[in-house]
Amino acid sequence: MKKVILILCLLCNVIGAYAHNEEDKLKVVTSGRTISVVNFEEGSKIKLFEYRTDEIVLVKRRGEIDFTQLEEGEYVLVNEKGYKVLVEYKGHKINILEI
């Protein structure tokens, strides 16, 4: 009986940890050449890195990034909790990929 209760407790902890991580993931939508972080919290920061060189391109305290002033290429968007998405910017098209 103790083993069953222990297994159930461990299972609940694993499920709870997975559900919490899903809420924290970076949720991003695109509109033209602008991307918006849907689950951005006021006072938080997001960072945009150039994918190949890993250099910081910008740090924002707002949940929107306008790509019209940036060069075409691949970028990594990171929130304060460390969740990342890959942003491919090719001309007029922006693709978002989870990392």
Image (cartoon, rainbow, N blue to C red):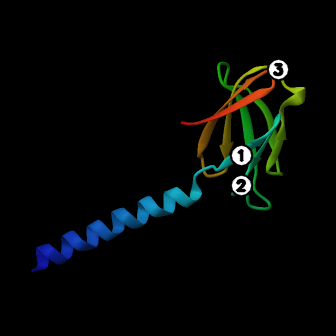
> Mark 1 touching mark 2, by CB under 8 A?
yes
Residue 99, horizontal then vertical, whole percent = 54, 36
The residue where tag 3 is placed is: 71
Q: Secondary structure beneath disc 3?
A: loop
Task: Choose the circle earlier in sequence order: 1 or 2.
Answer: 1
Residue 48, horizontal then vertical, whole percent = 74, 35
Instruction: Determine the image quadrant of residue 6.
Output: bottom left
Q: Which mark is residue 3?
A: none
- As measured in the structure, the alpha-carbon distance from the residue carrying label 3 to the one carrying label 2 is 24 Å
Instruction: Determine the image quadrant of residue 76.
Output: top right
Amino acid tagged 2: Val
The residue where tag 1 is placed is: 29
Residue 34, horizontal then vertical, whole percent = 82, 39
72 and 95: which is toward the camera: 95
Instruction: Determine the image quadrant of residue 49.
Output: top right
Amino acid tagged 1: Val
